[in-house]
Image: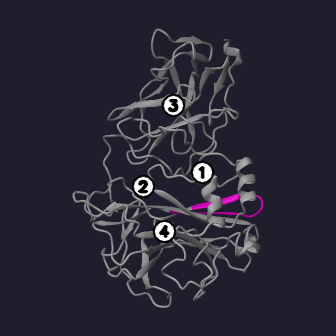
């Protein structure tokens, strides 16, 4: 076993401008605790021990945290790591050093065999996660497996971990601030897989036809566009000679009454468009505006004060604020959410957002899993002065709202295009994609 056989990860690191999928902080300090990691990064776990324990981790104090590499199942005979890691400052990657954690660990050049730790590092933010990476290797079947994204370790990458300051002020709490569980609009580990992206243009809505629209509407059963009823619009330029694009969201009521002590928490809306050469993407913000409409009509809003806006999330549901009837659905949007981009230049488009059920009063029991609502997102092309716009770039896949965060998406790409872009590592950088490209 020679250290010269180790594969050094590329020194170029992906920027971390807009990660949106993070688990809520548990007792362990590291937030990434399973095999999922944002596209382009290695997982923080050991794929080879059977326990799949975290090997890129940290311990957290009130003002600083300490990076750690290794576990109770690793030692100098089966584990090694690079002595340099990187911390995301908010605008760039900055170096930090790792050293042996115990007498078993041995330093050889730029590598250490065994477990390690870094010096104490300051949190980058009191409110947002602090990200850092390390590069670790496992001795498995007589060869080194380094920077593993999967158990095959076919494409080495820096292994990403994140921490939060446990002593930081928490946004939210109670019903007035619209914080739900007090996680301040965190998306709680929500991610989307290739199959879910494909389902968005091939499968019917999770409740179909939608109860809130006439069954003959073209989006009553499927997203628009889709491979079943509108294949000609998939992978095609949008056209329409519009100058801006605008994201929106829907909440569809499914039952005759609202859930007990529960409403919908909605995260920010994201858009990305591809002009044939590259992606341009936007975190448009939280959908704090919304009206309700009667079933089967979008002519006149019935309730115009239905959304509570928090710092990082919005909240709505039957019985909350002005939404008092179950036979109405919500159409929401982001104030000043339009972005300038010619619709004729859009080759591919995708919009996504997150939602979950949360208690209105966290001190009372709540019906969080009664399947009361569907959620969907979409994107329209606009020109200033347009009224009664009925053509969309995409009207997304309607899915049930659960107690855990889910990613909801609408897009214009075929399964073949999605897989190709994934293999080229050319999906939108901020899309919380996880898993295989197949």
Q: Residue at x 63, y 38 (%)?
A: 13
Q: Which residue is drawn at 61% across and 84% down?
A: 390
Earlier sequence position, callout 3 versus callout 2 = 3
Residue 329: which quarter of the image? bottom left
Pointer 2: what residue? 404
Pointer 3: what residue? 52
Pointer 1: what residue? 433
**Number of numbered tags placed on the structure image:** 4
For the residues labelled 1 and 3, the Cα–Cα distance comes to 21 Å
Residue 432 in the magenta stretch? The answer is no
Q: Work out whether residue 159 can be spotted.
A: yes
Which SS class for mark 2? loop
Residue 129 appears at what percent x and percent y? 44, 44
**Disc 1 versus disc 3: nearer the observer:** 3
Earlier sequence position, callout 1 versus callout 3 = 3
Residue 236 appears at what percent x and percent y? 76, 70
For the residues labelled 4 and 1, the Cα–Cα distance comes to 19 Å
Residue 273: which quarter of the image? bottom right
For the residues labelled 4 and 2, the Cα–Cα distance comes to 13 Å
The answer to whether marks 4 and 2 mark residues whose Cβ atoms lie closer than 8 Å is no
In the rendered view, does 309 fall on the left or right side of 5?
left
Which SS class for mark 1? loop
Q: Work out whether residue 278 can be spotted.
A: no
Which range of residues does the magenta coloring cover? 269-282
Residue 136 appears at what percent x and percent y? 58, 26
């Amino acid at each position: 076993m020679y250290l010269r056989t180790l594969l050094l990860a590329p020194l170029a690191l992906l920027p971390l401008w807009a990660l949106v999928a993070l688990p809520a902080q548990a007792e362990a300090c590291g937030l990434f605790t399973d095999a999922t990691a944002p596209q382009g990064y290695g997982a923080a776990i050991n794929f080879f021990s059977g326990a799949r324990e975290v090997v890129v981790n940290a311990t957290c104090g009130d003002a600083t945290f300490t990076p750690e590499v290794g576990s109770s199942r690793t030692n100098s005979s089966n584990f090694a790591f690079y002595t340099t890691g990187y911390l995301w400052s908010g605008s760039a990657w900055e170096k930090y050093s790792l050293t042996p954690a115990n007498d078993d660990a041995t330093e050889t050049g730029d590598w250490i065999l065994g477990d390690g730790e870094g010096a104490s590092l300051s949190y980058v933010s009191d409110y947002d996660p602090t990200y850092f990476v390390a590069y670790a290797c496992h001795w498995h079947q007589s060869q080194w497996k380094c920077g593993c994204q999967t158990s095959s370790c076919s494409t080495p990458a820096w292994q990403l971990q994140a921490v939060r300051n446990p002593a930081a002020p928490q946004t939210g709490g109670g019903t007035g601030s619209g914080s739900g569980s007090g996680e301040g609009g965190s998306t709680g580990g929500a991610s989307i897989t290739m199959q879910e992206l494909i389902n968005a243009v091939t499968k019917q809505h999770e409740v179909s036809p939608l109860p809130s629209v006439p069954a003959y509407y073209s989006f009553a059963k499927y997203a628009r566009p889709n491979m079943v009823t509108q294949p000609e619009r998939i992978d095609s330029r949008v056209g329409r000679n519009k100058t801006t694009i605008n994201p929106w969201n829907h909440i569809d009521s499914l039952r005759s009454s609202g859930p007990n002590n529960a409403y919908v928490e909605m995260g920010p809306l994201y858009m990305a468009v591809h002009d044939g050469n590259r992606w341009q993407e936007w975190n448009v913000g939280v959908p704090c505006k919304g009206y309700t409409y009667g079933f089967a009509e979008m002519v006149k809003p019935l309730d115009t004060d239905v959304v509570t806006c928090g710092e990082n999330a919005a909240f709505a549901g039957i019985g909350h604020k002005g939404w008092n009837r179950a036979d109405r659905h919500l159409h929401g949007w982001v104030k000043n959410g339009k972005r300038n981009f010619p619709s004729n230049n859009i080759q591919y488009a995708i919009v996504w957002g997150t939602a979950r059920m949360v208690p209105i009063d966290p001190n009372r029991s709540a019906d969080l899993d009664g399947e009361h609502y569907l959620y969907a997102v979409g994107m329209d092309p606009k020109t200033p002065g347009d009224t009664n716009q009925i053509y969309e770039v995409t009207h997304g896949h309607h899915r049930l709202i659960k107690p855990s965060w889910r990613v909801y998406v609408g897009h214009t790409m075929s399964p073949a295009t999605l897989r190709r872009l994934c293999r080229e590592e050319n999906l939108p950088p901020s899309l919380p994609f996880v898993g295989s490209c197949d």
